[in-house]
Image: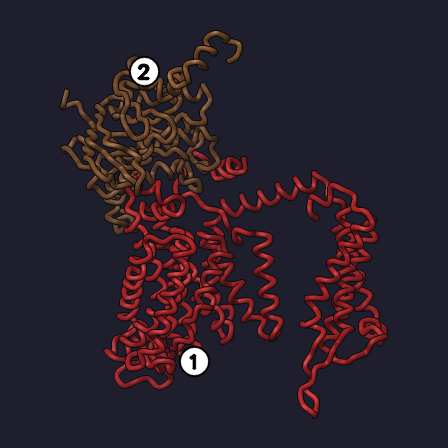
Amino acid sequence: MTDNKLLEVEHLTMRFGGLVAIDDLSFNANKREITAIIGPNGAGKTTVFNCLTGFYVPTEGRLTLHAEDGPRLLERTEGFRIPRNKGVARTFQNIRLFTGMTVLENLIVAQHNRLMEASAFSLAGLFNLGKYAKAEKEAVEKAEFWLEKVGLYAQADWNAGNLPYGSQRRLEIARAMCTDPSLLCLDEPAAGLNPRESAELNVLLQSIRDDQGVGCLLIEHDMSVVMQISDHVIVLDYGKKIADGNPEAVKNDPAVIRAYLGEEEDDELPPEVAADLHLDPKAQ
Amino acid sequence: MSAAFASSRTNGSEVVKELAFFAVIALLMSVMLLGVETVDRPTGLELAVRWDLVLIAIGATVIGRLGLIFRRENISRLGQAVLITLSAVAVFEMFVRFRELDDRWVSPVFLDMVFSSVVSTIVGIAFVAIIFATAYFTMKDKTSADVEESAKLSSKIQLAYRSNTKKIGLIGIIFFIIFPFIFGEDRSAIDLATLVMIYIMLGWGLNIVVGLAGLLDLGYVAFYAVGAYSYALLSQNFDLSFWLCLPLAGIFAASFGIILGFPVLRLRGDYLAIVTLGFGEIIRVVLINWYDLTGGPDGISSIERPSFFGLADFSRRVPEGTIGFNELFGMEYSSMHRLIFLYYLILVLALVTNFVTLRLRKLPIGRAWEALREDEIACRSLGINPTNTKLSAFAIGAMFGGFAGAFFATRQGFISPESFTFLESAVILAIVVLGGMGSQIGVVLAAIVMIGFPEMFRELAEYRMLIFGAGIVAIMLWRPRGLLSFRDPTILLNMSQKEKVAGEIK
């Protein structure tokens, strides 16, 4: 199964001063799979994303992306180079669209690098030479494909900031996909969505996995999304991995239940109080 | 007119309180400006106190305010009009007294003037009647239908503007091209138009940095200075012609843009503004103090004027081996030829700036600038290199500043650090901001308002700056995001402009 690995995280540690946000975390994410990272608030999930996408340089550890052209060490790549050449794309927990620009422009900006090359760094583009015109047409076609896919075709010329919240979330995913990634990192894509929108999101993510063959890394609190679509779940608590496996196994893992619901408090109570509680259920 | 007041009927004591408040404000504002005056007497300068002016100012304010209260509370339309008219008459009285400098107390100048002759009686009554009628008929009760109507009208105007930007731009260009044919013999008109055009070009150049890339640059004049001094020094020391120096000046200014860009890349907003402000000052201080090279505060004089593309000269007595422009075309010599040529030169330079900007906006680099303005972090996550993108904006903006600078040097024939103070940066920035960030036509309008009007109304002397200030306050009140603050999408998929605007309003 080694050749199926897409992302390899080995001994990742991230410290902010004295605070250890991620502590010796290792996991793998496979190609054509949705890997969910879950855990209570403050467990370090978003920090993992920030390390993967170059916003933080990890204190220790190795992050390897097995892209088509061979393995790449993400922790040694400058942040803005990570999304290039079938790299890692991401969305943000608090949506970060270019709100003053139109929906279509958002998707074209995402294809900046290819277009920039085609325009010979603006020189050819200035005179609208054929090569650039063709590249721009392709970019628009790609944008149209994703607009259809996320159901925003009719709003293509709206300002992105005027879209309703759910549509903004979908547009952000479409924008990330326009960079042609091999790994897509989604930071709480279902936050603030109603059940119908969440169900649509499930379909979209499954299609990205199955039709586009893109691996997804997903941070999510909405268990209906996580349990239905993920192939593999990793649970973090206080920066450490406490469980790793398929959704069914993780759901029943006592360590996970403890992290989410807390310890059984009976053990810590003084014996006489515990005895009281058991004798008189009404007292609870 | 605030909604908070409109909802509740104000009672008597509140009205008195409000009027007293405005009376105090009027007193504070007028007591030093109007109430005290230095008078040149044989014994020397003396302070004269003019309480009549202060009283009238307070009276005009209180009456005017009462009129506004009437309007707010929808009390007697007639009363509103009477109060507004009275207030206007009081303001008129105040101005007349201010100019006349005598201390009459009893008889109002206004009445004296009106009833001094038959003609003035008619004029005076007409004046009052016009104000009264205007006040009376505009004081119609505002209903919700009126509000809706005016909103509809403003969106109609918006739509008309937005779907016709190309035509409006074309009309503007044609107007500027035929301008010298209309005012051909009027030296001051051509001079003024050239000056306005320089600022339009500077505004367009700065618009790339501030309007598109969203990098607040308070030191833009530095690049203007670099361009001007590049041309002046190259021409004096190496005897290079204007046509060779023009691109060089642009390249020098662009390199300075990159030099400034590097250290400030990590900064944003206020911090960036302060550093660029400092950079502008550094350039100016270097120009003042590097006496050997720049001539320091003396500046550089007798800078070579441009030739007619190296073919002919504009001087009355042409140097050996060249021919005069008038001889080339078989015309009488006229000193206007050079001015008109300079006007067309800056027009072409400005239009090049405009077209390059418009084209760059639709290219990946321009979209990246705008994306960077919206959200830098999202840009990084999409693989856009923020460093290069910002540097390119700085460099291209600076390049156009450099071109304008070289033109300025050749037009004036004399430059000194005096011409490149912070005030210039502020004026250029004001043009961009008042015009509406990122709007090309907005910059033209703002340059005409900011540069053209104060020059045109030079006769108004000291009141000119007063009106100028009032104009800026008015623009900021009515159009806080600039005169023309719409962003045109760089690419449209399927909708007509009309639907787009509708979608936006929705």
Dividing the picture into quarters, in which one does residue B275 lie? bottom left
Q: Which chain is brown?
A: A
Q: Mark 2 near mark 1, Cβ–Cβ under 8 Å? A: no
Chain of the residue under the numbered disc 1 shown in the image = B
Examine the rendered structure and indicate whether residue B313 appears above or below residue A210.
below
Residue drawn at (28%, 46%), measured in percent from left and top?
Answer: B385
Three-letter amino acid code of the residue under disc 1: Ser
Which chain corresponds to the colour red? Answer: B
Between B445 and A91, the residue placed more toward the observer is: A91
The residue that disc 2 covers is A254
**Is B150 on the left-hand or right-hand side of A151?**
right
Left or right: A157, with A229 as reference point: right
Query: Which residue position holds label 1?
Result: B334
Instruction: State the colouring used for the structure image.
Output: by chain
Residues at marks 2 and 1, CA–CA distance in whole angstroms: 97 Å
Query: Where in the figure is residue B232, as x and y percent of width and height?
Result: 32, 76
Residue placed at 36% from the left, 82% from the top? B301
Q: Position of residue A96 (x, y in %)?
A: 39, 38
Q: Residue furthest bottom?
A: B42
In the image, A62 versus B116, the foreground residue is A62
Q: Compared to B335, does B469 lie above or below?
A: above
Q: Residues within 10 Å of mark 1 (few under 14, many from 20)?
A: some
Q: Residue at x 44, y 45 (%)?
A: B488
In the picture provided, is A269 more to the left or to the right than A28? right
The location of residue B340, given as percent across then percent down, is 43, 72
Chain designation of label 2 = A
